[in-house]
Image: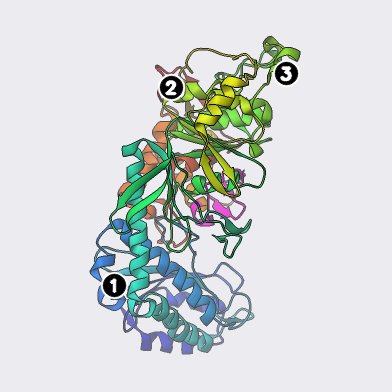
Amino acid sequence: MNTVDALVDFLNRIDGQGYKAYKGLLGTWAFPDFALHVDHVQGDPFARPSRLRVILPPEAAALEDDVLSSPSRRLGVASLLAKRFHEAAQKTMVRRGSGKSGLIEIETPGQEVFAQTAVIVRDDGTVEARFRIGLPAQGRRARGHEAIALLTTDVPAVVSESLHAGSVGHQAILRHALTNEDADALRAELGARGWVAFVADGAKLARASGVDDRPLLGESAVPFSTPAGLTQEVELPNAGTVRGMAIPRGVTLIVGGGYHGKSTLLRAIERGVYNHCYGDGRESVVTDSSAVKIRAEDGRSVAGVDISAFIGTLPQGQDTHSFSTPNASGSTSQAAGIVEALEAGATTLLIDEDTAATNFMIRDRRMQALVPKEAEPITPLVDRVRSLWETRRVSCVIVLGGSGDYLDVADTVVAMRDFRPADVTAEAQRVASELPTGRETETSGPIEAFRTRHPDPTSVDPSTAKREAEVKAFSGPSLVFGDQTIALSAVTQLVSRAQTLAVGRGLLLARDRFMDGRRSVSEILTLVMQVIEKEGLDALDDRSVGDLAQFRPMELAAALNRLRTLEVCSTESVGPGR
């Protein structure tokens, strides 16, 4: 292993040489308290920055045993250290030449906590951080002296401030570790108690803005207050007794006037499929980990999805048992979204009428009289939501402000007023009884099994004219896969660029190892997730990259389903299950 002195000598020698001289940095360099691995050197100062890792042995990181004792605690610690690394880099780095010279950057976690590759905390206390730097240049010549300052002063300063327990503070580290462990324990209670979600008393659900996911602060931030009738208590390993609102499985409506907090509550539930960091305000807001937000998505492509339970034969005789289109309507896209979510393993669906197709949600009595059923292929969700629960055990949480017809099919009704919830289930049942709508149910009987889809591997092509495989992710989010750009902005439970990139790499893994024309979508998703569970996120990329984050099979399925080249064949399924 090369020493720091050897590193300085090398950089002095290449000062003023062509930029490619930096290739000599590849390898491992021994610093007093960490090893610096240079895994990739950028081709020029304007290219994507060079890729590095630092590995601190346990004695250097100095993390105490109480923050290492479980995977949950280690994930909480890793998330905090990645944020500290980002903050220290922003404060430390200086411009050191042309292009990206002097840059120090790491993939920074947001408010959610899940496995990622930016910072990894191992069970023995070893800490590994993966990041990028911009090697200094003057034009396209190496600035060796500036590179010495970057690598031997700036980088060690960032490491010292962010990855050493003594600099971060044990109590801060412990808070993040315990918070994450409690969230996992709370999530385990959902299945055991038959709940879809739990929202803790005092939780801060509102966010700072539409582009800032940190909690809203000040007098306008109304803490969540648990409504009588839905109040439950859970004993957590660290926080002790936590009181909150438990949403039971079945059909739940969130109702109320405009701007009273309906969608704010649903968004918190939507993000509750992930843990949240200490100080986020949603630390004890957790949701069934398979819950999927469903919305209308005009213009998306659909490949061979059996939407016949919701939409019958279309004009010109188009069959909907294996429905394909490059330009879905609001109703067909929402129907496809539900079936695709179930195919991926979802047991809870989250729907907000603001982003739903009205004709998919409801046909009231007047419209039924004006447009007879034989002229309307859509069976609205109001007539299918009970069957989803009773025959497939799929729960729905639906935000509504304009359709009282759903009161007839709801198990639980929560009303929001001034951002405060109330259990109005009994009142809703009374209203439904005293004020019948007169609409006729447009279907009867259970939802039959959906057809099984088998992707054609040749239609999932990651190659371009120049590359065997091209996978890139952008904020928005969107994913480049081969020659195709997959629009994922409607997939609202993709919360970071690192997650989106990992989904793209997961799609590549699925294509290379598991798509054979015979395996179903469900089987392929299961196999990919098994590989990640066994081998970690590095199974998606063998280059030890730092920009990957954990995803669910639902997000991987969403990317596959929105790939416009996707082709499938479908077969009959047996029984009501997957």
Whether pointer 2 and pointer 3 mark residues with C-beta atoms closer than 8 Å, the reply is no
Q: Which three-letter amino acid code belongs to the residue tagged 3?
A: Met
Magenta residues span 470-499
**Mark before the other along the chain sequence, 1 or 2:** 1
Left or right of 40 in this view: 58 = left
Q: CA distance from mark 1 to mark 2?
A: 49 Å
Q: Which three-letter amino acid code belongs to the residue tagged 1?
A: Leu
In percent of width and height, residue 459 lies at: 54, 34
Q: In what element is the residue under mark 3?
A: helix
Taking depth in this image into account, of 73 and 410 the one nearest to the observer is 410
Screen quadrant of the C terminus? top left
Which labelled disc corresponds to residue 367?
A: 3
User: What residue is pinned by disc 2?
Assistant: 390
Screen quadrant of the N terminus? bottom left
Q: CA distance from mark 2 to mark 3?
A: 27 Å
Residue 40 shows in this picture: no
In percent of width and height, residue 58 lies at: 26, 73
Q: Which three-letter amino acid code belongs to the residue tagged 2?
A: Glu
Residue 98 to residue 432: above or below: below
Residue neighbourhood size for the residue with mark 1, other residues' Cα within 10 Å, grouped as few (<14), some (14–19), many (≥20): many
Residue at 46%, 64% (x, y): give it: 279
**Mark before the other along the chain sequence, 1 or 3:** 1
User: What residue is pinned by disc 1?
Assistant: 63
Whether pointer 1 and pointer 2 mark residues with C-beta atoms closer than 8 Å, the reply is no
User: Does the magenta-highlighted stretch encompass residue 487?
Assistant: yes
Residue 387 to residue 412: above or below: above
Residue 319 to residue 355: above or below: above
